[in-house]
Image (cartoon, rainbow, N blue to C red):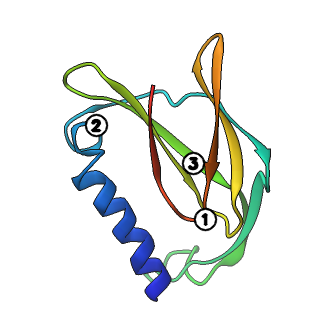
Amino acid sequence: DADRARYIGRWAKLRLNEGREFLAYGRMLRPPEVSVVNGPAKEAYDWYGYNCPAPWREYEDRGTLEVATVVSSAWQSRSGERACVLCNVSSAPVTVEIEISKSESKPIQLHSRQPVMVHL
């Protein structure tokens, strides 16, 4: 669908542009602590297991899975810079606090399905 294509396109644009040195050539790090301070912290998604061979017992299984609304990953570029990529996978905007260091956190507004890169 068109919404899904735009979402994937946003990730591709981030990887090819601002995030290139991190996402394409960098090294993955442990993500920082992220706390949702305003908006839904979890969202339920229905799933349906059709993308596997029919003999597997998971074939045509279905259910609901509750997941965090904000996913994050942290990266280090070849030059040593660090950045975090955040994405709100829910349909509502959220505000999060991201831990920059042991003594500093930063509030960030995340729009629905819009990946954001934050330099640490």
Using the rendered image of the protein, determine whether residue 68 is visible from the camera's viewpoint: no
Amino acid found under the numbered disc labelled 3: Val
Compared across the picture, whether 26 is left or right of 88 comes to left
Name which of mark 3 and mark 1 comes first in the sequence. Answer: 3
Residue visible at 39% across and 69% down in the picture: 8
For label 3, the SS is strand
Amino acid found under the numbered disc labelled 2: Phe
Cα separation between marks 3 and 1: 12 Å
Q: How many residues crowd mark 2 within 10 Å: few (<14), some (14–19), many (20+)?
A: many
Amino acid found under the numbered disc labelled 1: Ser
For label 1, the SS is loop
Residue 66 percent coordinates (x, y): 75, 60
Residue 102 percent coordinates (x, y): 62, 11
For label 2, the SS is helix
Q: Please identify the quadrant where the C terminus is shown.
A: top left
Cα separation between marks 2 and 1: 23 Å
The residue to which callout 3 is attached is: 71
Name which of mark 2 and mark 1 comes first in the sequence. Answer: 2
